[in-house]
Image (cartoon, rainbow, N blue to C red):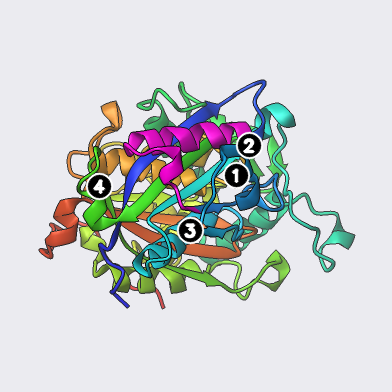
Amino acid sequence: MSSLRGKTAIAGMGTAGMGEAPGFSAIELLGQAAVAAIDDAGLAVSDIDAVFAATSQHAFASMSTVEYLGLKPKYFDSTNVAGSSFEMHLLQASLALEAGLCDAALICYGSNQRTAGGRLVSMSEPQWHETPYGPRHPITAYALATSRHMHQYGTTREMLADVALAARDWANLNPQAFARGPLSRDDVLSSRMISDPLTKADCCLVTDGGAACVLVRADRARDLKRKPVYFLGAAGANWHRSIVTMPDLAVTAASDSGPRAFEMARLTHSDVDLVMLYDAFTINTILFLEDLGFCPKGEGGSFVQNGNIAPGGSLAVNTNGGGLSCVHPGMYGMFLIAEAVAQIRGEAGERQLGECDVALLHGNGGTLSSQVTAFLGSENALWSHRRRRCRGLRLFVPR
């Protein structure tokens, strides 16, 4: 289970068109991010011999990437499990590198969703058992999960609003964030209702953007120009596709992927310095904090209150501003990786954490469908097995 821990590392990271990039296509933004990541690693485009890609706009994303960049890879993969694809790609690329199937793997994404249309709607196929009711996915699906959590656990709209406020507080420290400026609880609560109980401010942004990283074996990463960010472990879980077949609207498959990822990475909750969660909607953050074991099931709403996940809180969550305030170009998973790399390298500027050796990344795809948990870490995290201070968190293993 732990054989992949520390065997590979991110050697290069790049982003492009963050927020709004008029005049550029999705593949152009992907290509710009890819070239930036390759250059960041100190490599040439010709050094890339594996490609992992998924987008909302390309049926065969790896082939489109290969053609656009003029690559001739010996390993390629277009696994698309929606927004969690890129956390899965970290695992798949690490497996391919460890098996000797490739030497330099490019993981990449690009979208011009905002300037090409600018609507928050699902680009996936309709589900036959939902279509007769006229849902507006993905929002309708997440509203159902939110309503269930509120009914079952007493979660309030004020608690949801505090997730959005924390994201905005982090975004205000990030010059690349698309949505910056003041945001109050009243602003969130009085925002236009989109799908009850979710308002516009409970929903992620609709932006453009591209992001890419280059993964190599750890021994090679140490010889390249940038500080390596090591892959420590990952696991995925998928229990359903359609929201109406989700076994329990208040429990996601993160409760399965999380413990297995912790096991592979040989980490505990007290080791985690940064938590990057796929916050397409405010309920996501609450659900994933519970299901990943940072608080008991049903207590996620109270956990996020009083600035607990905002700057200065006890747990650093979505320090770039998340999908709610930083960037969300359709599939957000690559941007979880980008922020984790920045924090572990110590390159996050005003929002830089005092200590960031271990980052938990959790990707979500579909309608709370595919869940993938991954860990990245510094050299210190790779070689040190000491338990860090608990920081006062109550820790729970989800059932």
User: Are circles 1 and 4 on residues that touch, CB within 8 Å?
Assistant: no
Could you tell me residue 315's position as x and y percent?
29, 49
Circle 1: element type: helix
| Amino acid tagged 4 | Pro
The x and y percentages for residue 84 are 53, 56
Q: Nearer the viewer, mark 1 or mark 3?
A: 1
Amino acid residing under circle 1? Thr
Q: Which residue carries the number 4 mark?
A: 228
Amino acid type, callout 2: Ile
**Residue nearer the viewer, 245 or 231:** 231
Question: How far apart in space, not on screen, are marks 4 and 3 (Cα)?
Answer: 18 Å
Q: Distance between the residues labelled 1 and 4?
A: 25 Å
Image quadrant where residue 352 sits: top left
Q: In this view, does 47 lie to the left or right of 391?
A: right
Question: Is the N terminus in the top left, top right, bottom left or bottom right quadrant?
Answer: bottom left
Q: Which residue lies furthest to the right in this view?
A: 132
Q: Mark 3 points at which residue?
A: 89
* Sequence-first tag of 1 and 2: 2
Q: Is mark 3 on a helix, strand or loop?
A: helix
Q: Residue 27 carries which label?
A: 2
